Image (tube, grey):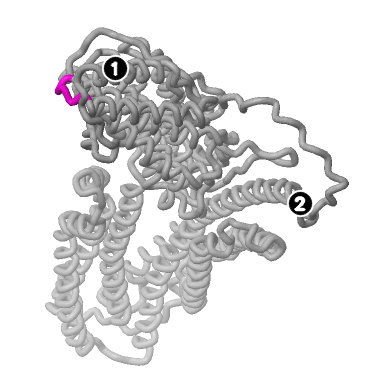
Amino acid sequence: MAAFISVPLKKSSEVDLVKPLSKFVTATYTAGEEQGEYVRAVEELNKLRRNAVGRPLDKHDSSLEILLRYYDQLCAVEPKFPFSENQLCLTFTWKDAFDKGSLFGGSVKLALASLGYEKTCVLFNAAALASQIASEQNLDNDEGLKAAAKYYQLASGAFGHIKDTVLSALNREPTMDISPETVGPLSLIMLAQAQEVFFLKATSDKMKDAVIAKLANQAADFYGDAFKQCQYKDNLPKEVLPVLAAKHCILQANAQLHQSAVAKQKKHFGEEIARLQHAAELVKTVTSRYDEYVSVKDLGDKVNRALTAAKKDNDFIYHDRVPEVKDLEPIGKAALVKATAITPPLSQKFSDLFEKMVPMAVQQSMSMYNQRKADTVNRLVTSMREATNLCNGVLASLNLPAALEDLSGDSIPQSIVEKSRSIVQQGGLQSIEQLIKDLPELLTRNREILDESLKMLGDEETTDNELRSKFNQRWNRTPSGDLYKPLRAEGANFRNVLDKAVQADQVVKDRYNAHCDMIALLCKPENELSAAIPSANPTKTLQGSEIVNVLRSQLAKLDTMKKERETMEGEIKAVTFDMSTTFLTALAQAGAINEEQLSLSQLDQLYGAYNQRVQASLRTQEELLGQVQTSHQEFSSLKQSNAEANQREEVLKKLASAHDSYVEISNNLREGTKFYNDLTEILLKFQNKCSDIVFARKTERDELLKDLQQSIAREPSAPAFSVPAYQSTPAAPAAGPTPAPRTVFVSTQSHIPVLNTTELDSWGAD
C-alpha cells in the first residue's frame, strides 16, 4: 500500500464585494446600460466568491473548477479596479491552513487589504483541493492514474507559483502556510507523488524493468529532496516527514528490485543479489521506523522471494561474486512529470464578468489624455478670448465705433444703444449681483466637505497612533500616516485650488465695483441714458468723408474676425476622439502605455490645424488694429475738438468699456459658479474615498484588536518553573501507536493492461 500526502484548505472570513465595487462603478461610469451591466457583474463576482471560499468544497473536479474560475476572475479584474489600501480598499482575512489553534483562542490568521493576497490564498486552496482529489483517485484503473498525475502536477505548479510570487504580492510577511519556505517543499512533494503515479502506471503495465527502475529512482530522488526541505519545518503536519522518508526508501527499494531483474537478464547474478539485499535493507528500515504510516508487506515479500531464489541459484549454479552496494553502477533517472504552468485562464469554462471594462492603465491614460485635451482646448480658446478682449479694449479707448455713429453730437450712438439692450436682456446688475452673492455659499460648502474629509483621516490616524504606542511592534499594520499621504496631498491640492479661486473671485468683484456705475447707467431706459450723456457740437462735416468709410471698413473686418473666432471656438470644443482603442492596442502589444507620446501625437492631429488658424487670427488682429489706430489719428485730427466734445467722448468710452466688462464679468461669474458646482461633485467623491478607506481601516483595526486579545490570552501568565520531584506523578503508559492522520490518504496498487513506453510518455503529456 502507498500513502499519498494531501494538503488542507485555508478558511476565509466573509467579505462584501458588492458595496465597495458597486460604489466605484457608479462613481466612475455614467448611469446607463454600461453601469448597470458592471453592477450586475459585481454581484456575480460576490456570488462566485461565496461559492469558492464561503462553503465546504467536495473533493470533486466541479469544486476545483469553481476555485479556478474565481482565481481566473481575480486575475482578470485586478487591472480593472484600483485595488489598494488607499484607493479601493478590500480587506481579506484568511486562516493558516496548518494551524489548529489553541484552547484559549482561534488559529493564526492574517487580514490584508490586498487582492494579491486573496489571489495567493485562492490558488493555495486550488492546489490543496487538487492534492485531495488526486489522493481520492482509484489507482486500480487507467482513468484514476491519469487524473491523479494531472492533479498532482497542477498542485505542484500552483504551490511553485505561490513560492515565486507571494512576497511581491503581499509586500509583507505572510502566514507560514503560504510562505516560500512552506509552499516550495509542498510543490516538490506533489511533483514526487505525480512521478510515483507514473511509476505505478509503468509497473501495472508490466513495462521493461529498466524503465520502471529509472521512474522509481527519479521519484525516490524527488522524495529525498522534499524530505531535506521539510526536515526543519515545524508547521507542517507531523506525519509528513515520516511519510516522505518512507517513500524515499520504498521507491529506492523498487528501483533496486527492478534493476536486479535487469542484472539477471544480463546474467550479472552477483549484482542481482547485491541489489536485492539493498532493497531488503530499505524495506526493513521502513518496517521498523515508519510502519504506522505505510505498509510494505507486499513489497517485502516480493523482495525476499526474489532474494531467496537468486541466492539459491548463485550458491548452487553460478557462484558469481556479490559486489558491495557502493560499487554498484548508479541507476538512471527518468522524469516524466513537470509542474503545470500557472497561466490564466486555468478554468475550462472561464468567461470574464467584466470583459467590456477597460483596464485601470487605460482608464488612467484616458484621464491624462482628457486633461491634456482640456488644456489644449483651454489654451486655444483663452488665446482667442484674450485677443478679443484686447481688441475691444483698444476700440473702447478710441471710442469706436461710437465716434463714427456720434457725428450729430446729440443722439445716442447705435452701438451704445445695442450694448444697453444686450445688458438688460442678460439680467443687468441684478443678474451679476445674484451670482456674486452665490459664490461665498458655494465656496463654504466646498470648504466644509474638504474639512470633514480630512478630519475623518485625522481622527482615524490619531486612533491608529495611540494603538501603535500601546501595542508597539504587535500593531503590525501599515501606519495610517503613511497610508494617507496620497489623500492628504490630494486634499492639500484641493485647498490650494480653493484659495486661488477666492483670489480670482476678488479680482472679478473689484472689476465689477470699478464699472458698477456705468453698467447701471447702461441698464436705464433710453431717454435717461441719453440725458446722462453730455451733448456736443455736431460734426456733420465728417459725414461721408473717406476716412470715416475707411474706419467703418476696418471695424467691419474686425467684427467678421470676432465672429469667425466664435465659430472656431465652437468647433474646437466639439472635437471628439475615442483614445481608448489606441491605448488598449498599445497595452496589448507592448504590455504598457506610453500615454504622453500617444496623446501628444493624437492631439497634434486633432488641433494642429486649429492652432495655425488661431495664430493667423491673432496676426490679422494685430495688423487691423494698427490700421485702425492710424486711421483714427487722421479721423481725430479732422474733428472739431472742444471741452464738451471731449467730455461726451469720455463718457461714451466708459459706457463701451462697461459693456465689455459686464460681458466678461458675467462669463467669469458663470464659469466660477460652474467651477464650484463641479468641484463639489469631485470633493464628494474625495469624501466618499476617505470615508471608505477609514471604514476599511476601522474594520481591519477591530479584527487586529480581536486577534491581539486572543494572542494575549494564549500567552502564559508567568515563566515556566520546575516542580519538585515528590510532587510529580508517573506518566501514564502510552495508549498505542499514533493513528495515521487525516491528511494522509491510502491507495492500493493494481495491474492494468500492458502499455509500451511511447504510450506512457504520451499519456503523461495529456
Count of picture labels: 2
Residue 305 location (% of width, % of height)? 35, 15
Front residue of 733 and 85: 733
**605 falls in the magenta region:** no
Res. 602 mark: none
Q: Give the quarter of the image for residue 262.
A: top left
Q: Give the quarter of the image for residue 638.
A: bottom left
608 relative position to 353: left or right: left
**Mark 2 is on which residue type?**
Pro
Q: Main secondary structure of the magenta part?
A: loop
Residue 363 location (% of width, % of height)? 35, 48
* Observer able to see residue 115: no
Chain part drawn in magenta: 265-269
> Above or below — where is 711 with respect to 613?
above
**Mark 1 is on which residue type?**
Lys
Front residue of 274 and 638: 274
Element type at mark 2: loop
Name which residue lies at 57% across and 33% down.
11
393 relative position to 550: left or right: right
Name which residue lies at 26% across and 20% down.
315
> Above or below — where is 445 with respect to 555?
above
Within-10-Å neighbours for mark 2: few <14, some 14–19, many 20+: few
Q: Which quarter of the image is occupied by the C terminus?
A: top left
Res. 312 mark: 1
Residue 525 location (% of width, % of height)? 48, 64
Q: Which quarter of the image is occupied by the N terminus?
A: top left
Front residue of 354 and 8: 8
Front residue of 516 and 440: 440
> Above or below — where is 209 with respect to 677?
above
Name which residue lies at 32% across and 20% down.
307
Residue 2 location (% of width, % of height)? 43, 21
Q: Which residue is mark 2?
A: 716
